[in-house]
Image: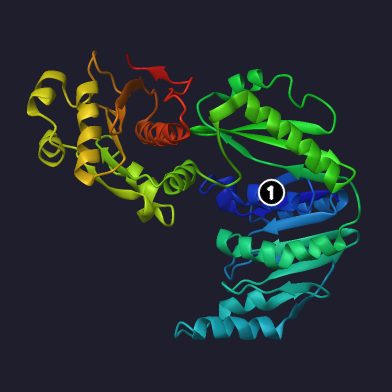
Amino acid sequence: MSAEVLTIGDELLRGEIVDSNKSYLSDRLLSLDIETRFHASVRDDPEDMAEAFRRARERSEIVLVSGGLGPTRDDLTIEVLARTFGHKLVLHEPSLAAMRAFFARFGRSMAKINEKQAWFPEGAEVLPNPIGTAPGTMLREGGTLFFCMPGVPRELYLMMDEQVLPRIAAARRGGPVVRSRLLRTFGLGESNLDELLADVATDGPVVLGFRTAFPDNYLRPLARGATAEEADARLARVVETIRARLGAMVYAEGEQTLEDVVGVRLRNAGRTLAVAESCTGGLLAERITSVPGASDYFLGGVVVYANEAKVRLLDVPEGLLAEHGAVSEAVARAMATGVRERFGADFGVATTGISGPGGGTPEKPVGTVWIAVATEESTHAESFLFPFERERHREVTCQVALDWIRRALLGEALVAPRYLRSGR
C-alpha cells in the first residue's frame, strides 16, 4: 500500500517546533510492511490544506494526518477535509459527552469553543482519544483512507498504536514484506561508515540508509521479500555482516540508548559506577539516572566546578591543581580515582574541560577536555579537542565517557571516536 504522512500547522513551517511526528508515523507504518512514499507539511491555511488533501488522494492509499484537531480558530483539519470532499459535518454526541467528562474530572466546565472537536465528516469513523480532548477520525475517500490524529505526540502515539494501526492492518492487501532494523553507532563519521560498508547492500532487495543524530550515526538496513521468512533472513544476513565489519562501534539496536546499554551491562556484571563532573555539570549523572533502575549500579556523583570543591570533595591535591591546572591529565585522573574511592564504586569517571565560549588559552583552547576512567587496577585518561559549541561539547563528552564504560565492560580498548581530534 502506498502511504503518505501530512503534518499541519504554522508552527511547523516557521520552524518553531521540530516535526518528529513524521518520523514516528513512518516508522510505525513500517511495522506493517508499508513504506511511506511522501512526507508533506502545510500551514493552517484552508486552500493549502485542501490542495494537500486532494494531492494525497491522487497518489496514496493511506494518508496519516497530524495536527489541527484542537478547539481554536486555527484548528481546521476536520472542517477542511470535509469541505474538500463534499461531506457535511455532523455532531458526534458520544465525543461531546466524553469531552465534558474530561473537563469534569479536573473540576472544570468545558468552554463552548471545545464543542467544535465533536463535529466530524458524515460517514467518517471517530477514533477515541482517552488522554486528550481531540478525537481522531478515519474517512474513506475513494480508494484512500485518511486518518486524522492530534499533533500532540503523546496523544498521537497512543491513537496510532491503538486505533489506526489495527484498521490499516485490516485493510492491507497482500504484497512484498518489508523488514528493517536500526543500528546505532558511535565513533565513526557518516562518510567513513559508508566507505567501510561500500560493498554491503549495494543492489537487489536489501538497501542501507545512513542518518546522523549527533553525536551518533544510525544505520537502517531494510530488506524486502515475498514472505516474512525471506525478508527476515535477508535482513539477518546483512545485519550480521555490518556487525562483523564495525565491531564495538555498533552499540545498540532500535530505541536503546547508550545509557540503557551501559546500565544493562553494569547490572548484569554486578558492577557499580560513580562520576565526578566539572565541565559537564551533572549532565553525565542525569543521563545515567534517566534509566529506570539505575540505583542498581549507580552509586552517585559530584559536580566539582570550583577547584576548592575538587580538593574538598575528591581529595584532589592542591599541588596538582597549582602545577597543571584543572583541565589536565593529572587532575582528571585524581578526580576519577577520588570519586571511585569516595563512593566505593568499581568504576570512577571524571570529566574536566573548557566548554566555552570563553575560558580558553593558547595552550588549552576552548573545546579542550580530559576524560578519565578509573578502576581498582588502573586509570585511563585522554584529552580531546571537541570543536563544538557549549551544549554539543558537553553532550559528546558524556557520550565518550559512557562509551568507555561500555567498552571496558566488553573488554574492548577505550578508543577515541575517529572523527574527533585528540587534544594532545
Measured along the vertical axis of the image, is residue 126 above or below residue 54? below
> How many badges with numbers are in the image?
1
Question: Along the horizontal axis of the image, is 71 left or right of 77?
Answer: left
The answer, for residue 82, to whether it is visible in the render is no
* Percent of width and height locating residue 31: 74, 52
Question: Along the horizontal axis of the image, is 339 left or right of 262?
Answer: left
Q: Secondary structure at mark 1?
A: helix
What residue is shown at x 16% (from left), y 38% (from top)?
314
Measured along the vertical axis of the image, is residue 325 above or below residue 179? above
The answer, for residue 224, to whether it is visible in the render is yes
> Which residue is label 1 attached to?
27
Coloring scheme used? rainbow
Q: Quadrant of the C terminus?
A: top left
Q: Quick one: 187 or 117, which is closer to the camera?
A: 187
What residue is shown at x 66% (from left), y 81% (from top)?
95
* Percent of width and height locating residue 369: 30, 25
